[in-house]
Amino acid sequence: MMQPINLHDYEMLAQKRLQRPVWDYYQGGSDDEISLRNNRAAFAQLRLRPRVLVDVNNCNTATSVLTRELSMPILVAPTAAHGMAHSKGECETIQGADAVGSGMIVSNDASRSMEEVAKVSQGLRWYQLYIRSQPEARQLVKRAEAAGYQAIVLTVDTPLLSRRERDIRNKMGSFQRIYYPGAFTGNVHNSLNGSIDDDERAAYVGHTLSWDIIAWLRTQTSLPIILKGILTAEDAVLAVQHGVEGIIVSNHGGRQLDGAIAPIEALPEIVAAVDGRCPVYLDGGIRRGTDVLKALALGAQAVMIGRPILWGLAVGGSEGVKHVLQILQQELRSAMVLVGSPTVKHISRSLIQ
């Protein structure tokens, strides 16, 4: 195949390169995968209202995220076990992101340690945290601070692990332990923590967590705290009341509650509820620059890309990651020109029907 020209091309190439259990682990959702499909379908329901005769000769996708200057409002979402897509795992991924002026949220369940990743990156890097126990979480946030991470992204939509039937059929837990034993152990010494065999599903301490955990986390770190997994205005208001520095609107890529609202559908009510009191980001379903544009128009400060980054990593390592982000950036720039928005700040709600 010729050089990929869009993210769908990378998807097809990655499927040919990855073993079936790995492909299904990365691609799959929970139960009937309704949320997984709807994350994409929801974008197609939004129509753009382009303005004409606007000077867009110097169209620029640059923005800032938590005071960090970026070349585009597109970040790498936290996804587990990059070591199953490339031998250098997250170290390779973040170099691709850095090369184009993007940034990365490093997963709690990464293949490479947060310290290894930090050594090869000078760009934006946040650490994504699951609280499975308070002693473990305390250690992880202290390590993140010491390694120069700029924020803690607490994932809050996982009181238990969903049933991911592709992984159950593939006996993914056993497969991973045999062929990729270190895939999830860069930061914590655990085996597969995404969708392990049905009779081995481990309980999270997450099922006992409440909003009080934010205050506890504040006692453990001075880093900004961003909550990932908010889908309602009610929870967005509570997040603001607890003083978080950001909200990521996400349904876990369709991997947790099946049938949950798509992030792009939830975004308007959350932006309205937050009312500018903290940044709102969107994670889930982005495949085109027009998707990025729609999310920004509905109030997201930036978006996060998950599965397509893994496709790029599997196909071309850091260069593949870099190219995936470049494609999205170029598509976003083209979309901005065509709707008459010369800068990210010019993108407004009026562009969406």
Image (tube, rainbow, N blue to C red):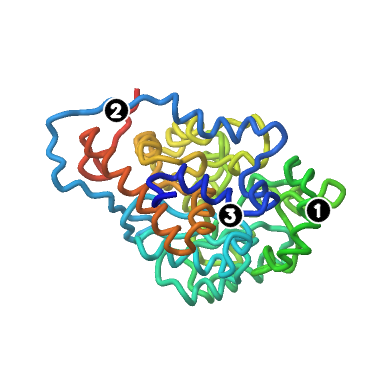
Counting residues from the N terminus, which is met first, the one under dot 2 or under dot 1? 1
Distance of mark 3 from mark 1, alpha carbons?
A: 30 Å
| Marker disc for residue 27 | none
Quadrant where the C terminus is found in the figure: top left
The mark nearer the N terminus, 3 or 1, is 3
* Disc 2: CA contacts within 10 A as few (<14), some (14-19) or many (>=20): few
- How many neighbours does mark 3 have within 10 angstroms: few (below 14), some (14-19), or many (20 or more)? few
Residue 40 against residue 317 in the figure, above or below: above
Residue 69 appears at what percent x and percent y? 32, 60
Q: Position of residue 128 (x, y in %)?
A: 57, 58
Q: Residues within 10 Å of mark 1 (few under 14, many from 20)?
A: some
State the mark number for residue 350: 2
Q: Amino acid at mark 3?
A: Arg
Q: Nearer the viewer, residue 178 or 127?
A: 178
Q: In this image, 347 relative to 138: left or right?
A: left
Residue placed most toward the observer, 149 or 47: 47
Q: Quadrant of residue 216?
A: bottom right
- Type of the residue with mark 2: Ser
Q: Amino acid at mark 1?
A: Ala
* Secondary structure beneath label 3: helix
Q: Residue under circle 1?
A: 202
- 184 with respect to 77 (left or right): right
Q: Residue at x 38, y 55 (%)?
A: 65
Compute the Cα span from label 2 to label 1: 46 Å
Residue 310 sits above or below residue 187 on the image: above
**Number of numbered labels in the structure image:** 3
Nearest to the eye among marks 2 and 3: give it.
Answer: 3
Q: Which residue is mark 3?
A: 17
Q: Which residue shows up at 59% across the image and 59% down it?
A: 85
Question: Which residue appears at 52% of the width and 71% of the height?
Answer: 117
Q: Quadrant of residue 6?
A: top left
